[in-house]
Image: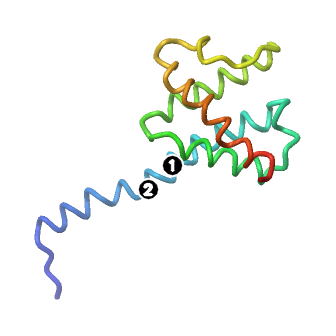
Amino acid sequence: MVVLKPWIVAGIAAIVPLLGSAPARADAVTQACLGYASRSDMIKAVPAPNRQKWCACIIDKFDPEDDETLMDVFEAQEDSESKGHAFSPSSLPPSQVRVGNKYANTLNQCISVLLGG
């Protein structure tokens, strides 16, 4: 019979919930990105595998604490495009500008992935 020390049990209990959080995080942000990409007139014609890689490239550049704001930025970009305007981080609420600026820079870093490079 194996007897586990209380501190081992506590450590395992603390780690197990975290194991399921990374996929949930990625799923929510990835779905928001892919949703935007599939509706964007600029991106929807790109093959789906490239859109998936593009979203992964973008998401990988952000910390988990930026997830909610990043999803808001995807919505803001889609809203701008639907009105025929270019996306501008300066049009975001102050609480989203930092992530919006980082997103705009990330677009340049990930464009080759979108184009299949």
Identity of the residue drawn at 51% across and 27% down: 99
* Left or right, residue 40 beside residue 65: right
Q: Quadrant of the N terminus?
A: bottom left
Whether pointer 2 and pointer 1 mark residues with C-beta atoms closer than 8 Å, the reply is yes
Q: Distance between the residues labelled 2 and 1?
A: 7 Å
* Left or right, residue 42 beside residue 56: right
Q: In which quarter of the image is residue 80?
A: top right
Q: Mark 1 points at which residue?
A: 24
Q: In which quarter of the image is residue 58?
A: top right
Q: Residue 20 carries which label?
A: 2
Nearest to the observer: residue 99 or residue 30: 99
Q: Which amino acid does label 1 sit on?
A: Ala
Q: In this view, does 85 lie above or below 104?
A: above
Q: Which residue lies furthest to the bottom in this view?
A: 1
* Left or right, residue 83 beside residue 70: right
**Residue 78 x, y percent position in the rendering:** 73, 24
Q: Element at badge 1?
A: helix
Nearest to the observer: residue 2 or residue 29: 29
Identity of the residue drawn at 19% across and 66% down: 9
Q: Element at badge 2?
A: helix
Q: Which amino acid does label 2 sit on?
A: Gly
**Residue 81 x, y percent position in the rendering:** 78, 20
